[in-house]
Each structure stands twice: as C-alpha cells, then as structure tokens.
Image: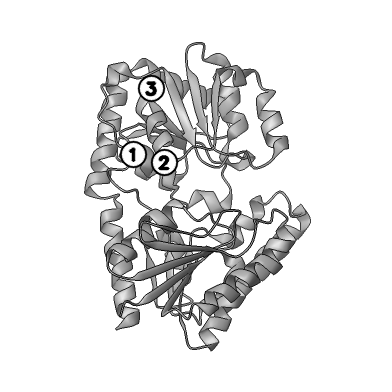
Amino acid sequence: MKHRICHFLSVHPRFDTRIFLKECKTLSNSGYNVTIVVADDKPDEIKDGISIINVNPKRDDRFTRIFLTSWMVYRKARELDADVYHFHDPELLPYALLLMLKKKKVIYDVHEDFPRDIYSKYWIWKPLRSCVSFLTEVLENFVSRRLSFIIAATPHIEKRFLKINRNTININNYPLPEELFSANDWSSKDKSVCYIGNINVERGIYEVVESLSSLDYISLELGGTFESDKIEETAKAYEGWKKVNYHGYVNRDKAKEIMAKCVAGLVIFHPHPNHIYAQPNKIFEYMSAGLPVIGSDFPLWQKIIKGNGCGLCVNPLSPPEISEAIRFIADNPQTARKMGEKGRQMVENEYSWDFEKIKLLNIYSELLN
C-alpha cells in the first residue's frame, strides 16, 4: 500500500511552483499517494496523479483566512488520516501541533523568515510590528521544536531552525533545469527586460518603472499580480509606465515565452530584513532561462549573481543605477549572452532541483521507515 502524504495550504495557491511542481510531483513520481488540501475558488481535481481538494471559496479578508479558512484546511487534512502531513503557511502552526498530539508525522516547510517579514507588512500598524514579530517568533519556535522535521528554503533559515529542532535541513528552491530554457539566438531578442512575480512596493515596482523613463528604446515585460489596486494605480502614474508591457498573471508557459525574448531578468527587492538573506526563486529561474540577472546589491545576492559572472547588482532604491544596469545589458549583447550562459551553466551544475529533490526523498524515507 502506498504511503499517504498530505500537503495542506491556507495561503499558497494549489499550483505553487515549489509545492506542486517540485515537491508534490517529486513525491508522486516516487510512488507516494499525494493529496493537496487548499483554500481557493477552484474545484477539486486530480492533476498529474496528485489529488487536490478545495475546502471553501477563497476568502480575501485576512481575519477570516487566518481563523476560519486555516481551521477548515486543518479539518479536511485531518480527515484524510495521512501518514505524513506537510504544511507551508505559518498560520497553520497551531494545527500542526494538534496533528502532533494525534501522533502524526508533521513537516513544516519554511519558505521565508516570517518574523522578519512582519516588518514589511504594510497592513500592520508600524508601531506594532516589532511586537507582532516577537510574538510570531515565540509561537513559531514553540511549535517547531515539537515537529517531526523542518524544511528550510534557504541556508539562513536553516541556521535559525537548527537551534530549535535538530531535524532541520535546507532544501533550496532551485528551478527545474529544463522548464524555462529556450535555445534562442541572442540576436533575435527584443530590447526588453522582464520581471515576473508578485508585484508590490517591497519588490521595487516603483523604482523599476521610474528607471524606464530615461531608457528611450528599452521596455519592461511585466508579468504578475499587483498586491493592491492602489499600488497598481501609483505605478501606472509614473512616466516610465509608457515603456511597460503589462501581461497580468502569467502561467509557466507564458513566463518561458516572455523570458525567451528578453535580454535580462530583474529582481529589485528592497533591503528589508527578510530579503537580505533570501534566495528568490526568480534569480535562479532567470539563470535557468539563460538570462543575465539584474538584482539588488545585498552581499548574498552579489555572491550568487556577480560572483558567478551571471549579471549585475544595483542599489534597489536608486532608479538611475537600475537604469544604468539595464542600459549596459541592452547595449552589450555579447557580454549579456556570456552572462546568461554562465548562469545557465551554474543551474546545470549546482542550482538545480535535481539535486535538492534527493534531500526531500531522504526525509520522507527517514520518517516512514
């Protein structure tokens, strides 16, 4: 009989790249019976052999999501009586503890340094953020100490949780090596750069759009969803918006198509505590697509991007510096092509999900044997 695995989510979408495409498909392809319990506005389905169960229509208000939706996700997950439970959202921590009390094996997949991420949450009153961050860390540490295993998405997060739970391992969110790569002739590319992902203030949308105003012949291919209508309205008021081709939400195939025609990918995050030690998936996805990366000048990012010769790093709060980097890439196609080739080579040799999935399978083997 196949071991039953349940990934349960209250915030992440059902086809999240890390959760569905990488972890769940790896487990399913290795013979596990995998179910995802999710809260969204889509019907139940079976996709690539993975069962997906929706507990209720998507709720946009945070209070309902945190206190009602999370309970409904937990209740459905509990009904499945799985052999291993694997969750990804911090608001599910109390329910993870309940599952442990029921003698279940539970894995916490920590995508971000959540207590530090609190400081960039605009919807939390600024004077309260330090207190909320502290209380969040207390809860996270208390529950995590009692869980079967902690999976950390970066070495920095792993270092923090190893002090709490010795059963902690870093599984990097590296790309599927062939998913986004197109062997296009560099001379056929447009004079455009791209950003594909969540669009908000902390990810530098205003600085990026402002930087375009001085670039007469270079455009931005922008894919993703704005965090709020206000942010979208503000971004569109900048002079540089005239150089933006906004696609809205894009699926993985469309993302590949956009990257194939661009000369660089942008990852211009603000210097918040949760960003400085992060390893955004977009950096490695651009590298896997053979694109130079223009990223923020955090020391870790400089090591990955400049250290491997696969792009440029800039002050994320300086539109002129961002503009200069974009212009350099666009005006020097041979240098840009070599940067893209080096990034692609690093993905093939080191920054690949093919290496990380072995660690995931070892965890499950250890827990179930």
User: Mark 3: which secondary structure?
Assistant: helix
Front position among marks 1 and 3: 1
Image-based side of 46 in relation to 350, left or right: right
Q: Name the residue under label 3.
A: 329
Query: In 3D space, how far apart are the residues under numbered discs 2 and 1 (Cα atoms)?
Result: 8 Å
Q: Which of marks 1 and 3 is nearer the N terminus?
A: 1
User: Which quarter of the image is occupied by the N terminus?
Assistant: bottom left
Residue 73 pos. (x, y %): 59, 69
User: Mark 1: which secondary structure?
Assistant: loop
Front position among marks 2 and 3: 2
Query: Quadrant location of residue 239?
Result: top right
Q: Are marks 2 and 3 in contact (CB under 8 Å)?
A: no
Q: Which residue is drawn at 42% across and 32% down?
A: 265
User: Mark 2: which secondary structure?
Assistant: helix
Report how many numbered discs are placed on residues in the image: 3
Query: In 3D space, how far apart are the residues under numbered discs 1 and 3 (Cα atoms)?
Result: 20 Å
Q: Mark 2 points at which residue?
A: 252
Q: Looking at the picture, does residue 242 appear above or below residue 117? A: above
Q: Nearer the viewer, residue 106 or 24?
A: 24
Residue 294 badge: none
Q: How crowded is mark 3: few (under 14 residues within 10 Å), some or many (20 or more)?
A: many
Q: Which residue is drawn at 38% across and 54% down?
A: 21
Q: Residue at x 53, y 49 (%)?
A: 275
Q: Which of marks 2 and 3 is nearer the N terminus?
A: 2
Q: Mark 1 points at which residue?
A: 180
Q: Looking at the picture, does residue 32 appear above or below residue 206? A: below
Amino acid tagged 1? Leu
Q: Are marks 2 and 1 in contact (CB under 8 Å)?
A: yes
Residue 333 pos. (x, y %): 31, 19
Query: In 3D space, how far apart are the residues under numbered discs 2 and 3 (Cα atoms)?
Result: 25 Å
Q: Do the residues labelled 1 and 3 touch (CB within 8 Å)?
A: no
